[in-house]
Amino acid sequence: MTDRRAQVERNTLETRIAVSLEVDGSGERRFATGIPFLEHMLEQITRHGLMDMTVDCDGDLHIDDHHSVEDIGITLGMAFDQALGDRRGLVRYGHAYVPLDESLSRVVIDFSGRPGLFFSCDYTRDRVGTFDVDLAREFFQGFVNHAKVTLHIDCLRGDNDHHKIETIFKAFGRALRMATRIDAEAANTLPSTKGSL
């Protein structure tokens, strides 16, 4: 297996972001974003995806969290795209159902090369703490566009919005873990009849 790592920096007038990713990691992580709830969700990705990740973001939080959350999703998507290379030998597909008390979410991912987000979660309030619940979707939209994946996210049930979002991120980590593994029986082939992803 090749060394599947990436380091990506993305700087705009709104955010300055550096992401380090090791796909075949153990869940090591360090985050400095100024958005505690997002860091808690990123921890779910690393812990359940068994990936090593650092994220540093200096964003315009004096306006709100939107630019930082979206741009972190974008930069993380770029890192996955870089780390996975031509995606040869990739399992490609991943899925997970994850519960947390009354909440249950399903995430299905395809490293198809075709960006598409299909996101369904009904919230009962606007914020979890200070975190705008709409930003969860913005994070995944940024990720999808730059990782070039098709991603289906469905919160199937739940009452507590913190639990709903957390089940989504945990399931996302699990689905990533499945989809990014190398298929030992097809390690030198692309998982597509087109011959490219």
Image: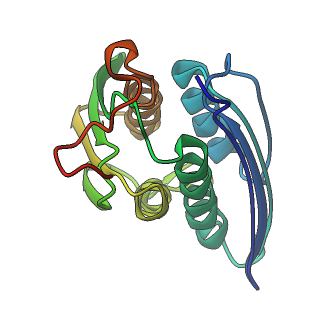
Position of residue 142 relative to residue 104, above or below, is below
The residue located at (26%, 49%) in the rendering is 195
Q: 33 or 88, which is in the foreground? A: 88
The residue located at (39%, 53%) in the rendering is 125
The residue located at (62%, 51%) in the rendering is 79
Numbered circles on residues, count: 0
- Asked which colour scheme the image uses, the reply is rainbow
The x, y position of residue 65, in whole percent, is 65, 66
The x, y position of residue 131, in whole percent, is 58, 54
Position of residue 137 relative to residue 4, above or below, is below
- Which quarter of the picture shows residue 2? top right
Position of residue 175 relative to residue 197, above or below, is above
Position of residue 9 relative to residue 43, above or below, is below
- Which quarter of the picture shows residue 43? top right
The x, y position of residue 162, in whole percent, is 47, 36
Q: 196 or 35, which is in the foreground? A: 196
The x, y position of residue 188, in whole percent, is 40, 29
**Outermost residue, bottom side:** 13
The residue located at (40%, 14%) in the rendering is 184
Side of 17 where 94 appears, left or right: left
